[in-house]
Amino acid sequence: MLVLSRKAGDTIKIADNIEVKILEVKGDTVRVGIEAPKSVEIVRGELIQSIKETNAESLTLDLDWYKNLKDNK
Amino acid sequence: MTPQLKEIATKFHGKIEVDLSKAWHFPKGLPGFEEEEEFVILPIGENEQFQVLQSTKEAGVAFVVANPYKIVEEYDFKIDDPTVDLLEVKSPEELMVLGIVFIKEPFEDSTINLQAPLLFQTNNRKAKQMVLNDKRYLIKHPINKKKLDEIKEKTTSGKSE
């Protein structure tokens, strides 16, 4: 992993079309601005993690419950 | 389209023959299930509210899905550009929307994922679970309206009607 130290106002360029800017550092929170082409997907890391977990949890349905659903119109 | 019949193993339906020309192709899989790229939608008996999204490759990967608009009538969101590109969406009419249901016991506690809806492009049969950068909708939205009201009541407790 590449590790860089940056200050508020500093930027990081990724490839030739993505720029990450450190907007503000306040206590334990860093505000980050990202400029990227519209085709680039940007999602909070913990959000995608929660969705992965919920997807996995949703698979735990057992056959009994399936039968309940089946009989329940 | 000519039918491509294939026997697959499923979680709830045993071994069945499906028509792969009617399968849905998830080019990127689903979050946490990136390897699962092909699914079919199967009925749950006579139940009209729920269906199963079954992987054609892994019998164990089968999600219960439901029409989110039956649960939240005013459900609305913007489809982001990467999704429009991936699914080659030209108009919203081409899309079918479903939500993954997390069935819990008791059944009234079950939830639907409104923060990451499943989008199906009905012309080319490409599909994607799109993550909304939108805090209005929950990953675990109660499917039972009474439960939702209870939660809302708790979060606004102190205010009298």
Image (cartoon, coloured by chain):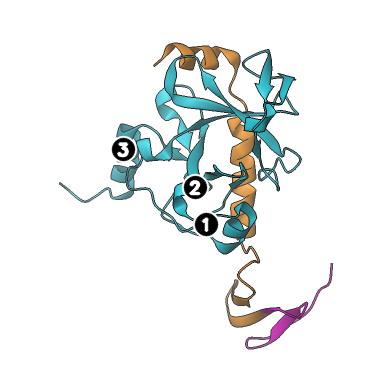
Q: Are marks 1 and 2 in contact (CB under 8 Å)?
A: yes
Q: Could you say which disc has been placed on residue B94 in the image?
A: 2
**Residue B138 in sight:** no
Query: At 69% from the left edge and 29% from the top edge, which residue is drawn?
Result: B20
Residue to which mark 3 is pinned:
B150
**Percent x, y of residue B64:** 54, 28
Chain coloured cyan: B
Q: Judge if badges 3 and 2 mark residues of a common chain.
A: yes
Magenta segment boundaries in residue numbering: A1-19
Q: Examine the structure image and report whether residue B85 is included in the region drawn in magenta.
A: no
**Percent x, y of residue B133:** 52, 59
Q: In the picture, residue B143 is in which quadrant?
A: top left
Label 3 and label 2: CA atoms lie apart by: 36 Å
| Tint applied to chain A in the drawing | orange
Looking at the rendered structure, the secondary structure element under dot 2 is helix
Residue to which mark 1 is pinned:
B90
Label 3 and label 1: CA atoms lie apart by: 40 Å
Disc tally is: 3
**Percent x, y of residue A25:** 60, 80
